[in-house]
Image (cartoon, rainbow, N blue to C red):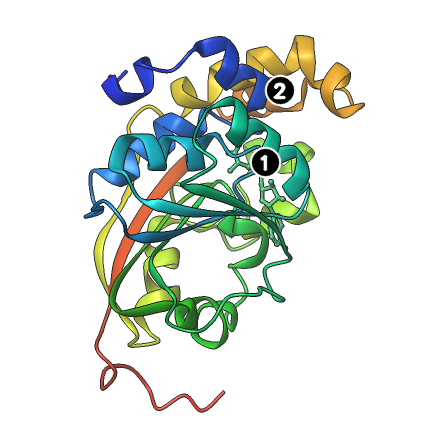
Amino acid sequence: MKKYPLTEKYDQNWIEKNWMGPNPLWLLEELCEHMDLKPGMKVLDMGCGKGITSVFLAKEFGVMVFANDLWVSATDNLKRFEEADISDKVFPFHAEAHALPYAEGFFDVAIAIDSYEYYGADEMYFPCTYSKLVKPGGQFGIVVPGLAKEYPKGYPDTLAHLWQGEMFSFHSKDWWRRLWEKTGIVDITACYDMKSPKEIWMPWAEWSVDNFAKEWGEEGDFDMEFLGADTNNDIALVVMAAVKRDANGGLNLKH
Ligand SMILES: C[S@@+](CC[C@H](N)C(=O)[O-])C[C@H]1O[C@@H](n2cnc3c(N)ncnc32)[C@H](O)[C@@H]1O
């Protein structure tokens, strides 16, 4: 599997204590290869979970991070940012994706690691809400779990017995590209499947078997079963980055 040298600087126990899916720092480090992050930039970390991606962004790139999450409270995240000695650069927020408290055009960059699929697979979310948060010339980046290709039913037969409602937001890279590209608001600068997605996903699946119930109160063997059932290699981790066009680009969207 590919190496992620920036992530290697971080304590594995700290990562495992705070991750909420396949190693978010690996996914972020991959995405950052396609982002141009400069000190002082204002970055929205959407669906930051317990905020380890926010800490990474501030420490590695010197950016100012607005760490936004729904399931994890801002107070809990503040404690983590203080413990990581980065609370002067990372600010915790608790807000739902459709009720964000930020001004339009406030951010230089908006990223979302293993989160955008929960709210952003809706056709309207990008043109009507998310794209407005970032200034012209600003950048977007997501990494989402998905599928290597689209299926008429929405899922491959191999995974049918495990498919759950929220997984209908798992799509191919081409599907994600079209979702944003057709709005005319952005130019896509990267869109591809990460190499070895199941190897990347596996440490989280293994951790979940032993620890998920303690942390989240539910059985944690689902991911292991899901990866094991994927005999056709349909599971993907899609990376997509984009730059917002200037004010004259895109459709004349009034709302
Ligand atoms: C699978 S977790 C990933 C968290 C973190 N990025 C990580 O990888 O550890 C998905 C995150 O998306 C956030 N999320 C889901 N739906 C959301 C919504 N409607 N508005 C804001 N955040 C949302 C959740 O709060 C959750 O922390």
Is 55 or 131 nearer to us in this picture? Answer: 55
Task: From the viewer's perspective, tell me whether residue 217 is left or right of residue 243.
Answer: right
Q: Amino acid at mark 2?
A: Glu
Element type where label 2 sits in the image: helix
Residue 244 appears in which quarter of the rendering? Answer: bottom left
The residue at 36%/47% (across/down) is 64
* Residue that lies at the very extreme toward the right in this rendered image: 217
Q: Splitting the image into 4 quarters, where does residue 61 fall?
A: top left
| Visible residue check, residue 235 | no
Q: Position of residue 204 (x, y in %)?
A: 53, 18
Is residue 171 positioned above or below 126 on the image? above
Q: Position of residue 84 (x, y in %)?
A: 47, 23
Q: Which mark is residue 78?
A: 1
Q: Which quarter is ligand 1 in?
A: top right
Density class for disc 1 (Cα within 10 Å; few <14, some 14-19, many ≥20) is: many
Q: Secondary structure at mark 1?
A: helix
Q: Quadrant of residue 107?
A: bottom left
Q: Quadrant of the N terminus?
A: top left
Q: Is mark 1 within 8 Å of ligand 1?
A: no
Q: Tell me the distance, in whole angstroms, between the alpha carbons under discs 1 and 2.
A: 34 Å
Q: Residue at x 37, y 71 (%)?
A: 105
x then y, percent, for residue 21: 54, 29
131 relative to 219, above or below: below
Q: Tell me which residue sits at (45%, 68%) in the image.
A: 126
The residue mark sitting in front, 1 or 2, is: 1
The disc at residue 225 is 2
Which badge, 1 or 2, comes first in the chain's sequence? 1
Quick one: 75 or 210, which is closer to the camera? 75
Circle 1: residue type:
Leu
Q: Is residue 21 above or below residue 166?
A: above
